[in-house]
Image: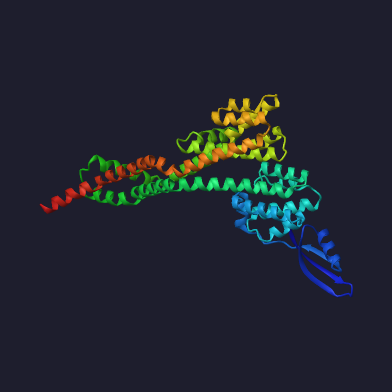
Amino acid sequence: MQTYSYKGRRDNGQLIEGEIESSSTSAVAGQLMSKGISPLQITEKKQKVDVIEQISQKLDLYKVSIEELLMFTRQMSALAKAGIPITRAISGILESIQNPLMIKALRDTLEQLESGRNLSIALSRHPKVFSNLYISMIQVGENTGRLDEAFAMMANYIDRNRKMSNNISAALRYPTTVIIAIMIAMGIVNLFVIPKFASFFESNNLDLPWQTVLLLTTSNFFVDNWHFVLIAFVLAFMLFKHYIGTIEGRYKWHRLILRIPIIGDILLRAYLARFARSFAMAYGAGVPIVQGMGVISRSIGNDFIARHVADMREGIERGETLTGTAYRTHMFTPVVMQMFSVGEEAGNLDEMMSYIADFYEEEVDYDIKTLSDKLEPLIYVFVGIMVLVLVLAMGIFVPMWDIAQLAGR
């Protein structure tokens, strides 16, 4: 909403001035007339330009966290269940939101609702905030008159994904910290410690061992060319971001992530759990299976799996069974394939998909709990590399020791 300054007269002729927030000048005029004020002048108030905010919007730095989306969804579920109109519910929620991207999305949604559009259509204008699955579930809730249940189901789905993501992040925090610490230590040694000794050795014209020569050569390279190295890293990062921004690049990158030893297998099952949970929720809500598969493929979060799901959708459109199309992807275990088959034959596919999601989520939870034990060998390798660097650094002190012995004699 925009801020407008106005001038008007009351019925008794009293001149009045003030400011009001609204979506348009006509809406401001309507609000003033409802208060018994005849508008004389309505001017949109120019807001101060926040340079930092403008840069953040241009660079797409604002994001809506999963916690913020979960809180909004739970609030909407509670307000819709209480029978509060959607426009009034969104207006009330807007007062307590701080995220600029979320505020912009909800204000636009409110304007779209006031102009007569459906909630699902209004939310679909903001794909960075609301996923395809989210919009489809809201659309089903609108069509069936159970909008509160649709929000409740989405809140439960988002909460499950949040817990799983937090568990994976917590398990990876320790090895990530160790690796970063090692890299920082190696950088400090090369850029600040070794150059101090290099100047001393040059002034004394010492015969240096190969360890010292190796360290000095490496250190001199980074000290003399650190700006080129930094530029190379920045360019490599930008090229990588551009590459994974393409359809084929993102597909290959997501496929590579799933092939990382130990971690890739956990991520694969986490994505399959999300697929099964999304399928169960959409199918149970009455979304046609072909439409549901299309929505899930666009909102699953991994292009490699999404392409397999899209292939399953095409197979179902050709008249094939869900079990047959799932078998060709080679993503599911034999036990899960049996559950697929039983669900199709018994006609309770949504219930079986919920069991599959529970099955994968339990496996992921167990693997996350034991992840630190599995990553210990890799951590030892990195620590060993650091120890090797320190051993080589001892070559710095060999000439120093020779000088000390010579001085003693």
Q: In which quarter of the image is the N terminus?
A: bottom right
| 320 left or right of 197 in image | right
Q: Quadrant of residue 342?
A: top right
Q: Residue at x 73, y 38 (%)?
A: 286
Q: Nearer the viewer, residue 359 or 223?
A: 359
Question: How far from the left and from the top, in percent, is residue 119?
Answer: 75, 48
Number of labels in the image equals 0
Front residue of 96/2: it is 96
Q: Position of residue 146 (x, y in %)?
A: 75, 47
Residue 87, compared with residue 42, is above or below; it is above
Instruction: Estimate the x, y position of residue 79 in percent, counting from the top left.
Output: 72, 56
At 67% from the left and 62% from the top, the residue drawn is 48
Residue closer to the observer: 180 or 330: 330
Q: In which quarter of the image is residue 131?
A: top right
Where does residue 126 sit, x and y in percent of width and height?
Answer: 69, 47
Q: Is residue 65 at all visible to an observer of this figure?
A: no
In this orientation, which residue lies closer to the viewer: 68 or 236?
68
Q: Is residue 139 above or below residue 310?
A: below
Question: Can residue 72 be spotted in the picture?
Answer: yes
